[in-house]
Image (cartoon, helix red, strand yellow):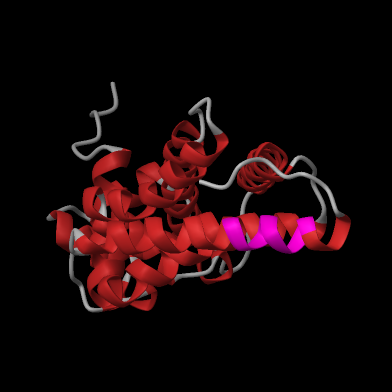
Amino acid sequence: MPRPSKFTEHQILDSAARIIANSGIAAATMSAIAHALGAPSGSIYHRFQSRDELLGRLWLGKIAAFHRGFSAALQHDDPNEAAIAASLFVPQWVRSDRTGARIAIMHRREEFVGGGWPPDMEREARRLGKEFDVVLDDITRRLFGEVSPTLRRATRFAIIDIPYAGVRPHISRGETPPPEIDNLVRAAAIASIRATRETYAELTGARRPTAP
């Protein structure tokens, strides 16, 4: 019988995430990950066929975790409260998983691709992207009564770009975002949504849902 692996996939990915958070993606070699775990390199290759696969699984896992939390925050019955909850989820998530947040917010997917992903990972990346587009369209429609490229951009700005801008400097310095960031994110998201409604009401003469 083959000996069971001493290290789980979760432990290996966590080790890689810590290396990336501290030293960047280039530092996350298979040997460096193995050394950090106190494991032979063979233990890593037992779980992952290549470094590209390992880094790809890591990126997909962190993005999927973010999407789950973000989507859950949008389940509030009131669209205004849902949008605010989603924007506040970003600093909350950074505090709960600083290494994961650094990977998802400070790095692009292309940095984790390398020589290419296996077909199943490409499918998973496309699935996550499509699911997120559906979620974004849904909250856009709930907030503004319709979906258009302009309104979708406005929604993304209010509930994603604003909180990202708020937490990014702290992530880059290895800091935990302070509590006051939440109040600033909330105020900026509310102002952005209100401004979009007012602008569209002026342009179309349509009655928009009540601003938060």
What residue lies at 87% left-to-right and 56% top-to-bottom?
A: 204
In this orientation, which residue lies closer to the viewer: 2 or 154? 154
Point out residue 80 in the picture as x, y percentages from the top left corner: 52, 41
Q: Is 13 placed left or right of 82 in the picture?
A: left
* Residue 102, quarter of the rendered image: bottom left
Residue 16 appears in the rendering: no
- Residue 69 lies within the magenta run: no
- Residue 196 lies within the magenta run: yes
In this orientation, which residue lies closer to the viewer: 119 or 1? 119
Point out residue 98 in the picture as x, y percentages from the top left corner: 25, 58
Q: Can you say whether 9 is above or below 41 in the image? A: above
The residue most toward the top is 1
What residue lies at 51% left-to-right and 44% top-to-bottom?
A: 83
What residue lies at 31% left-to-right and 49% top-to-bottom?
A: 93
Q: Is 80 placed left or right of 100 in the picture?
A: right
What residue lies at 77% left-to-right and 58% top-to-bottom?
A: 200
In this orientation, which residue lies closer to the viewer: 96 or 197? 197
Quarter of the image with the N terminus is: top left
Residue range of the region highlighted in magenta in the rendering: 194-201
Q: Can you say whether 10 is above or below 200 in the image? A: above
Point out residue 174 in the picture as x, y percentages from the top left corner: 20, 72
Point out residue 74 in the picture as x, y percentages from the top left corner: 51, 35
In this orientation, which residue lies closer to the viewer: 15 or 96? 96
Q: Can you say whether 49 is above or below 127 in the image? A: below
